Image (tube, helix red, strand yellow):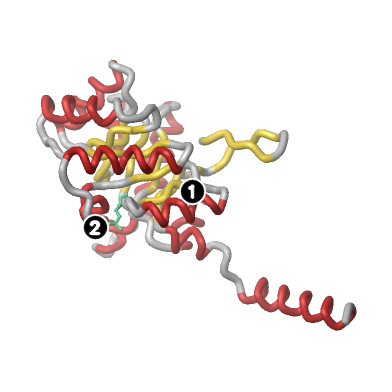
Amino acid sequence: MAEQTTGMCYFRAMKFFIDTANLDQIREAEALGVLDGVTTNPSLMAKEGITGDEAVKAHYKAICEIVDGDVSAEVIATDFEGMIEEGQALAALHPNIVVKVPAIADGIRAIRWFTDNGIRTNCTLIFSPGQALLAAKAGASYVSPFVGRIDDISSDGLQLIEKIRVIYDNYDFGTEILAASVRHTMHIIECAEIGADIMTGPLSAMKGLLKHPLTDNGLAQFLADHAKANG
Ligand code: G3P
């Protein structure tokens, strides 16, 4: 798990990544003061209208300038040689870039190559404990189990996080569990209870953690009492 600072104290903490390529949302999350990194994928890049090799690279650099933390950038190639070429170019953009690689056979091979060559990786599209085990054995820095997409097919995404946690703890794998496809506040809370190292989700889910009517009512009462007492 991450080591974070609070004043002069150090403690272990769940990391919060934002899952978007939208620069305004990344800035807003960064301004909250709790953002540890960013994850993107080809769909999120396309959603922002970022197309073409140069524009994609410039966008990743722009994200790295906003956030002082890891930024996952996904390869498009699905063959070993293509992934290596693309991943090296992405990693060269900024020290915080983590190369995102799909959980397929060539991807696992590529993760091993990247690991052996000092390039950090995020193994994505993880839907089973076996995929997470292989990714960890290949030396992935992160695995991304897709919680929400498993829930979408009436299965239990959080159960996958639990299983991966047990497997990694059994053997002290250094790979961090990056709970992805997080959709809402309860996903975040339950991932924290299970002990996911990181969650990546939308800004709305992060901000949703703050919502409580008793906080709003209590604050309104405090301010009203203060105004009454102070004229
Ligand atoms: O990090 C993976 C994530 O982007 C997938 O999320 O909501 O498209 O399932 P979603």
Tell me what residue is drawn at x 72 percent, y 73 percent.
219
Residue 220 can be seen, yes or no: yes
**Mark 2 vs mark 1: which is more N-terminal?**
2
How many tags in the picture?
2
Task: Please name the amino acid that badge 2 sits on.
Answer: Lys
Q: Residue 177 is drawn in which quadrant? A: top left
Give the structural element (helix, strand or loop) at label 1: helix
Residue 16: image x %, image y %? 48, 47
Farthest residue toward the top? 116
Between 23 and 166, the residue placed more toward the observer is 23
Residue receiving disc 1: 194
Disc 2: CA contacts within 10 A as few (<14), some (14-19) or many (>=20) = few
Q: Residues within 10 Å of mark 1 (few under 14, many from 20)?
A: some
Considering only vertical position in the picture, is 195 above or below 121?
below
Task: Name the residue: 41% across, 46% down.
Answer: 162
Quadrant in the rendering for residue 63: top left
Mark yes or no: residue 102 visible: no
Mark 1 residue type: Ile
User: How far across and how far down the image is residue 36, in percent?
Assistant: 49, 42
Where does label 2 land, which residue?
47
Q: Is residue 194 left or right of residue 54?
A: right
Residue 161, percent from left and from top: 39, 47
Q: Is residue 69 above or below residue 224?
A: above
| Figure quadrant, ligand 1 | bottom left
Q: Quadrant of the C terminus?
A: bottom right
Marks 2 and 1 sit apart, C-alpha to C-alpha, by 31 Å
Q: Residue visible at 32% across and 58% down?
A: 148
On residue 149, the disc is none
Residue sitting nearer the eye, 81 or 45: 45
Q: Nearer the viewer, mark 2 or mark 1?
A: 2
**Residue 179 position in % (x across, y down):** 39, 47
- Where disc 2 sits, the SS reads helix
